[in-house]
């Protein structure tokens, strides 16, 4: 009987990390679009509808041959467009929209061709409430 108790204790101890965290973090997306670069420009915008399986914050977005990528909010103040950098907080199972005229992605110092019909992968880094980090490569269509 004593060996049986040790076996139960060992199994519960070994499975505890899986029991306490439950499902793995997952990301689903729709409408993943990066705007085609205009001639002579090195900056463009991106849009995406994103849903996550656990509350998370986007802490970094990166891609090859792009200087840096930021999430921005945009509001109109009369005829003046005001943008500011944000760190989006995503709520479990709630769609978060990056869209024209609202929150969106800004790609700066683009050093590669972004032609309509092509695609590009952006690497998103998410941080959960428990500080665990997840990375996910997401493919965008260039339009």
Image (spheres, grey):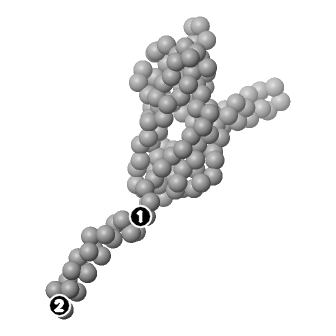
Position in image of residue 135 (x %, y %) = 41, 43
Q: Which residue is under mark 2?
A: 2
Q: Which mark is residue 21?
A: 1
In the picture shown, does residue 54 fall above or below 102? below
Quadrant occupied by the N terminus? bottom left
Residue at 67%, 34% in the rendered image:
99
In the picture shown, does residue 30 fall above or below 17? above
Say few, some or many: other residues with alpha carbon within 10 Å of mark 1 (under 14 / 14 to 19 / 20 or more).
few
Q: Secondary structure at mark 2?
A: helix
In the picture shown, does residue 48 fall above or below 42? below
Residue at 53%, 28% in the rendered image:
140
Furthest toward the right, the residue is 78
Say few, some or many: other residues with alpha carbon within 10 Å of mark 2 (under 14 / 14 to 19 / 20 or more).
few
Q: Is residue 4 left or right of residue 115?
A: left
Q: Is residue 43 left or right of residue 121?
A: right
Whole-number angstrom distance, CA of label 1 to CA of label 2: 30 Å
């Amino acid at each position: 009987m004593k060996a049986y108790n040790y076996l139960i204790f060992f199994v519960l101890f070994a499975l505890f990390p899986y029991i306490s965290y439950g499902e793995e973090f997952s990301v689903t997306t729709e409408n993943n679009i990066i705007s085609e670069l205009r001639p002579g420009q090195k900056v463009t915008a991106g849009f995406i509808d994103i849903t996550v399986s656990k509350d998370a914050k986007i802490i970094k977005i990166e891609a090859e041959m792009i200087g840096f990528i930021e999430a921005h909010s945009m509001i109109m103040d009369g005829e003046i467009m005001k943008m500011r950098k944000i760190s989006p907080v995503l709520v479990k199972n709630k769609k978060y929209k990056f869209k024209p005229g609202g929150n969106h992605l800004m790609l700066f110092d683009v050093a590669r061709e972004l032609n309509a019909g092509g695609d590009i992968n952006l690497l998103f880094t998410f941080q959960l409430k428990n500080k665990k980090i997840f990375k996910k490569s997401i493919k965008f269509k260039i339009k």
